[in-house]
Image: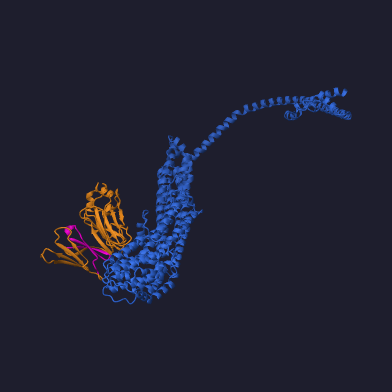
Amino acid sequence: MYSVLWEPMGDGKRVISLADNQALLWDLQESPTKATVSSTATLEGKGQLKFTSGKWSPHHNCSQLATANDTAIRGWDLRTMSQIYCVENAHGQLVRDLDFNPNRQYYLASCGDDCKVKFWDVRNVQEPVKTLEEHSHWVWSVRYNQSHDQLVLTASSDSRLILSNMVSISSEPFGHMVDDEELSEGEDNPQEEKVKEPLKDSVVSTYEEHEDSVYAAEWSSADPWLFASLSYDGRLVINRVPRALKYRILL
Amino acid sequence: MSYSSGGPDESGRRRKVHGMLKLYYGLDEEGKISEKSQSLDPCDINGPHFDPELYLNKLRRECSLAELMDQETCMVKQIRSLDSDMQTLVYENYNKFISATDTIRKMKNDFKKMEDEMDCLSANMAAITDFSANISGTLQDQHAQITKLSAVHTLLRKLQFLFELPARLNKCLELKAYAQAVSFHRRARCVLQQYSHLPSFKGIQDDCHAIMDMLAQELRQRFRDGGTSAKDLSECVELLLQLDEPAEELCDKFLSHARSRLEADLQGLEAEIRPYPTAVKDDSARRSSAGSPTDSSPKTSSLPSPTPNTDILEFIDRGCNEFVSSLCLVIASYQELFISHAQTGELASKNIPQMANRKLHVFVDDLAAQYFSLVERRIQEEKGVSDNSLLVRALDRFHRRLQAVSKLLPSSTVPNQGTEIVIRAATERVKQYLAALQSFYMDSLTDVRQALAAPRLSVAGGTGSGGGPHLGGGATSRDAPNSLPELLSILSASILNQIKSVLASVHLFTAKDITFSNKPYFKGEFCSQGVRESLVVNFIKFVCQSSRQFCESAGDKGGSTPPALLLLLSRLCLDFETSTISYILTLTDEQFLVQHHSPVTPVTILCTEAREAAQKLLNHYVKVQGLNISQMLRKSVETRDWVNTIEPRNVRAVMKRVVEDATSIDVQVGLLYEEGVRKPHSSDSSKRTFSVYSSSRQPVRYAASYTPSAPMDTNLLSNIHKLFSERIDIFSSVEFNKVSVMTGIIKISLKTFLECVRLRTFGRYGLQQIQVDCHYLQMYLWRFVSDENLVHFLLDEIVGSCAHRCLDPSPMEQSVIEVICERG
């Protein structure tokens, strides 16, 4: 058993578990005491394949799941339990974590042992939309801010936590260079990249309070400007988004 | 006293004479000069301001009696000699005067005689004039009659000529002496025109017209047939012009005729381009369709295109000899006929020269365009870069021959177009050379790759397939030394040679004896923009670019490039940065005398680019090698059941592999990079550090870690340790030396080990196995890194983390560990 994922939206009647090379979709509604497996998906291929990470997409009526095994990222349709896309060699090494953009349905962030954070448009799996190479060791966790999806948090075993401001691929563009509609529809990715924003994609700040590898980072569900990170030595650090940036985003 | 009165008198007279003589001979200026010195002294007897009183007083005051006496005799002597001189002068002058008087008297007598003779002559002349007037008066009548007679005679002869004209013309026609016929007709034409109201003349005129029409018909026929030579043709045209044929029509005809012949030449040339209609047809067709001037598809010219059966020099030669020379001939004869000829004659008034000139320009431009397109097509076929001199010579000849056209037609655009073609060909050639250089570079990289693959078999075979550690290390040190540095030197030398040879061939374009080399383009832009920028600079950029691509493409695909190649390229780029780039650029600048009118890429930018590429390659090398080792470590940690393992008896084979690989990498890097600085350590480093290392891991501490307070204790310890040690950047930039590279690789590997250990759960013997492994690594890895404490720290962390993850943390005795490790 690697991980258990709750249905991100809806009434929380469904759970997915990832174990070795199987993804099981459990239904909790059928009987009050016992969960029943409603469907399964199996990872097939050469050698022993194992799921290392997974994420349930909040979009498309919660019918999609993204999983990572070794260097590949796969998308699954939960209705048929079949593979819908596959990013082979998404990272040079193991993929550690995935996260869906909460506002743009086709956008996915991934991180891995090659020290990179990549942003994907799952409709075009040949090339990442954007790549960040700020960390100097494995990146263990990547998280979109739930309400301002340009803010991306990454935790790495180089004992750093990095907050990045990915304006160019966010759902709320700065300035008035691009139509909101066009962006929200998510078309013309290359064009979006070229658009000059007043605020450029940048690392907002690097948090070096941890003395050991940082394994997890998470945004607060209550306050969109608050986030926490946890490291190997048991230290939990809570930080805020810098005030200046907060105002820039809000105003 | 008598002297004193005589002295001043004498001297006064003499001075007067002297002054008069001076006046006479115009010696004023000299006198002035002498006056200056003399005027001051009144006692100078020869001076103009001589004062006898003063002089006398002075003498009397200063001299003794004897001296006075001497002075007196001297003076008397001087006076005497002066007197005699004067007498002689007067005498001589008197003699001359007498002889002059005699001469004048004699001349007077002679003139009187001559006057008489002149009078006699004038009387005779008057008599002759009278006689002459008489004679002319008597001859007057006869002379008038003779003049009249002769006028009548000429008129009669003219009439006779007119009457005979038709017959003569016919005869001329029969004999095909057209020129004579036309000249006869011209002579008679005006007269016939004038007297055409007389019936007899009218008849003659009609006859003549009929004949001349026939003649014109004949000439036109000849003109139309076109089989005749250019000279005949021009003769024809000349005659027709004289016959008042419309010049415009003639121009057209002449030009169209010339066109047909020139086009035949062009067709001959075109046939040369496609020599094998069957075999090469589709090929050449494809090329001709793709070979439009805009098409610059970068066809790699490494494989020589199927060359037509004539080389380009021959082709251009033929073009020049046939087309250009006959074109020149046509232009020359045309100009002579219609322009220069017409300017003098009556045709000039009808704007004929302008019209003819216009037509000629259109004609020449049209044909030249066809010719140029052919030449350009042919030049484009010249893809092989092997022999540039041929092309340059061909272009030179092409350009030179067009100069003839420009001499004939100064206002024509043809030579400029020709120059443009040459320029295009030259730039195209430069592009081809760039492509050739690039493909050469890629080829040599492939060669290096193959060469690396061959010796690597033994290197990798010794170390990679898990042989004994000592044997593997030995194999590496034996095989590798004569491969990597040699390959590097071969590679860089061959690149340099290639660049030099390319520069030499490109240099032909600017050679002194080539006509187009003194065009401003070839002097300035070609050198700076063409050669320096688009050839040399682009090539260097390409090298850096392609090197960088190795990093990027391999990054995702997991190392398709052999690491040794990365290392080699990194060193190559570094060498480029330090010396090669500036050398090449200096060489270029010197060879081409580049004057930087336009901004050019400075050396420093290229150097930084090369350095960045080198850095990136080396970083990538470290990553790839680190990844290889860490992959091994990760697999070894992940695949083992650490809870239920047996008591460690020896070091795991993986650790031996790691040390072996590190050794071989160390050797590999050492071949190309210098040692680099490391923090000083004692000669017995492994022993001593080992004891330090083990002291922090006393069994007592592990025993203490059972107790509830123990985790706090170790945590505190490691935290304190971390406070004092610098933060470790795992994938950081490395410096260009061996130690830095090795440190990077080992850091990556050990960090991976650490992270993997943290993900597992260990049993008692699992922990002990890790202890043994770490100790083994400790024994061997310290020597590779710049700061051995780094290795200690990471290994401490590994064992510490492992102890954390252990269900039953009872560490092994240090001595036992040592024994196991020493045993191998």
- Quarter of the image for residue B474 reads bottom left
Q: Quadrant of the C terminus of chain B?
A: bottom left
Instruction: Tell me if A33 is positioned left or right of B34 in this view.
Output: left
Query: Magenta residues?
Result: A49-78
Q: How many marks?
A: 0
- Asked if residue B1 is positioned above or below residue B456 in the image, the reply reads above
Identify the colour of chain A in the image. orange
Identify the colour of chain B in the image.
blue
Quarter of the image where the N terminus of chain B is located: top right
Q: Nearer the viewer, residue B493 or B613?
A: B613
B325 to the left or right of B752: right
Scheme by which the image is coloured: by chain
Residue B653 in view, yes or no? yes
The image quadrant that residue B49 belongs to is: top right
Residue sitting nearer the eye, B552 or A53: A53
Q: Which x, y percent locates residue B665?
A: 39, 68
Identify which residue, B454 or B337, lies in the foreground: B454
Q: Is residue B580 magenta?
A: no
**Taking the image as drawn, is residue B561 in sight?**
no
